[in-house]
Amino acid sequence: MKNFSRFALIVASVLASAPAFAQEAAAQGSWGGEIRAIAAALAIGLAVIGGASAQGRAAAAANEGIGRNPQSAEKLFTPLILGLALIEFQTIMAFIIAIILATK
Protein backbone atom coordinates (compact mmCIF):
# COMPACT_ATOMS: atom_id res chain seq x y z
CA MET A 1 0.00 0.00 0.00
CA LYS A 2 2.89 2.34 0.75
CA ASN A 3 4.35 1.86 -2.74
CA PHE A 4 0.97 2.53 -4.33
CA SER A 5 0.50 5.79 -2.42
CA ARG A 6 4.02 6.86 -3.40
CA PHE A 7 3.27 6.06 -7.05
CA ALA A 8 -0.05 7.90 -6.87
CA LEU A 9 1.70 10.97 -5.45
CA ILE A 10 4.24 10.92 -8.29
CA VAL A 11 1.55 10.57 -10.95
CA ALA A 12 -0.57 13.33 -9.38
CA SER A 13 2.34 15.76 -9.19
CA VAL A 14 3.34 15.12 -12.80
CA LEU A 15 -0.22 15.50 -14.06
CA ALA A 16 -0.88 18.59 -11.95
CA SER A 17 2.05 20.47 -13.45
CA ALA A 18 1.20 19.56 -17.05
CA PRO A 19 -1.75 21.97 -17.58
CA ALA A 20 0.37 24.99 -16.77
CA PHE A 21 2.70 24.24 -19.65
CA ALA A 22 0.01 22.80 -21.91
CA GLN A 23 -2.03 26.02 -22.13
CA GLU A 24 0.72 27.85 -23.96
CA ALA A 25 1.31 24.85 -26.22
CA ALA A 26 -2.36 24.74 -27.12
CA ALA A 27 -2.22 28.40 -28.09
CA GLN A 28 0.62 27.65 -30.50
CA GLY A 29 -1.53 25.10 -32.30
CA SER A 30 1.31 22.74 -33.14
CA TRP A 31 1.89 19.18 -32.05
CA GLY A 32 5.54 19.94 -31.21
CA GLY A 33 4.49 22.54 -28.65
CA GLU A 34 2.36 20.01 -26.82
CA ILE A 35 5.16 17.49 -26.68
CA ARG A 36 7.57 20.13 -25.38
CA ALA A 37 5.04 21.12 -22.72
CA ILE A 38 4.65 17.53 -21.55
CA ALA A 39 8.44 17.07 -21.55
CA ALA A 40 8.87 20.24 -19.49
CA ALA A 41 6.21 19.14 -17.01
CA LEU A 42 7.81 15.72 -16.65
CA ALA A 43 11.27 17.24 -16.23
CA ILE A 44 10.31 19.56 -13.41
CA GLY A 45 7.99 17.03 -11.76
CA LEU A 46 10.62 14.31 -11.63
CA ALA A 47 13.32 16.76 -10.55
CA VAL A 48 11.25 18.01 -7.64
CA ILE A 49 10.35 14.52 -6.51
CA GLY A 50 13.96 13.36 -6.74
CA GLY A 51 15.32 16.47 -5.04
CA ALA A 52 12.87 16.29 -2.15
CA SER A 53 13.58 12.60 -1.65
CA ALA A 54 17.34 13.15 -1.71
CA GLN A 55 17.15 16.06 0.73
CA GLY A 56 15.02 14.01 3.09
CA ARG A 57 17.45 11.11 3.02
CA ALA A 58 20.45 13.41 3.53
CA ALA A 59 18.83 15.09 6.52
CA ALA A 60 17.80 11.75 7.98
CA ALA A 61 21.33 10.37 7.63
CA ALA A 62 22.84 13.47 9.22
CA ASN A 63 20.39 13.36 12.12
CA GLU A 64 21.07 9.67 12.63
CA GLY A 65 24.81 10.34 12.70
CA ILE A 66 24.38 13.18 15.19
CA GLY A 67 22.10 10.98 17.29
CA ARG A 68 24.74 8.27 17.49
CA ASN A 69 27.61 10.67 18.13
CA PRO A 70 26.49 14.13 19.34
CA GLN A 71 30.07 15.46 19.28
CA SER A 72 30.13 15.10 15.49
CA ALA A 73 27.38 17.69 14.93
CA GLU A 74 29.83 20.45 14.01
CA LYS A 75 31.72 18.18 11.61
CA LEU A 76 28.53 16.98 9.88
CA PHE A 77 26.98 20.42 9.46
CA THR A 78 29.15 21.74 6.61
CA PRO A 79 28.99 18.61 4.39
CA LEU A 80 25.23 18.41 5.00
CA ILE A 81 24.64 22.01 3.91
CA LEU A 82 26.94 21.56 0.91
CA GLY A 83 25.10 18.40 -0.14
CA LEU A 84 21.70 20.06 0.27
CA ALA A 85 22.87 23.03 -1.80
CA LEU A 86 24.04 20.74 -4.62
CA ILE A 87 20.75 18.84 -4.59
CA GLU A 88 18.84 22.12 -4.73
CA PHE A 89 21.06 23.32 -7.59
CA GLN A 90 20.19 20.25 -9.63
CA THR A 91 16.49 20.89 -9.07
CA ILE A 92 16.88 24.53 -10.12
CA MET A 93 18.75 23.46 -13.25
CA ALA A 94 15.88 21.09 -14.13
CA PHE A 95 13.47 24.02 -13.66
CA ILE A 96 15.54 26.16 -16.02
CA ILE A 97 15.62 23.36 -18.60
CA ALA A 98 11.84 22.98 -18.26
CA ILE A 99 11.40 26.70 -18.90
CA ILE A 100 13.66 26.51 -21.96
CA LEU A 101 11.70 23.51 -23.28
CA ALA A 102 8.35 25.20 -22.72
CA THR A 103 9.29 28.54 -24.29
CA LYS A 104 10.90 27.29 -27.53
Image: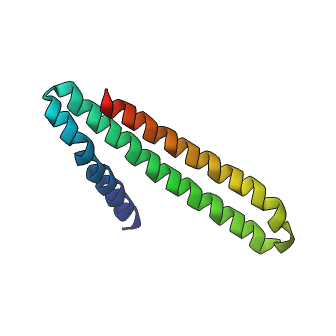
Image vertical order of residue 90 relative to residue 12, above or below: above
Quadrant where the C terminus sits is top left
Task: Report the front residue among 26 and 58.
Answer: 26
Q: Which residue corresponds to the image point at 52% horizontal and 51% vertical from the top-left? A: 51
Which corner quadrant holds the N terminus?
bottom left
- Residue depicted at x 56% and y 49%: 88
Q: How many marks?
A: 0
Its colouring scheme is rainbow
Q: Position of residue 63 (x, y in %)?
A: 70, 69
- Please tell me which residue is depicted at 80% across the width and 67% down the height of the picture: 73
75 sits to left or right of 67: right
Q: Residue at x 35, y 42 (%)?
A: 42
Which of the 4 image quarters holds residue 90?
Answer: top right
Q: Quadrant of residue 66?
A: bottom right
Compared to residue 64, the image places residue 48 above or below, namely above
Side of 101 where 18 appears, left or right: left
Q: Is residue 3 above or below residue 104?
A: below
Above or below: residue 69 compared with residue 3: below
Question: Where does the image place residue 14, in percent across and percent down from the top left?
Answer: 32, 49
Q: Position of residue 76 (x, y in %)?
A: 78, 60
Residue 80, horizontal then vertical, whole percent: 71, 56
48 vs 22, left or right, is right
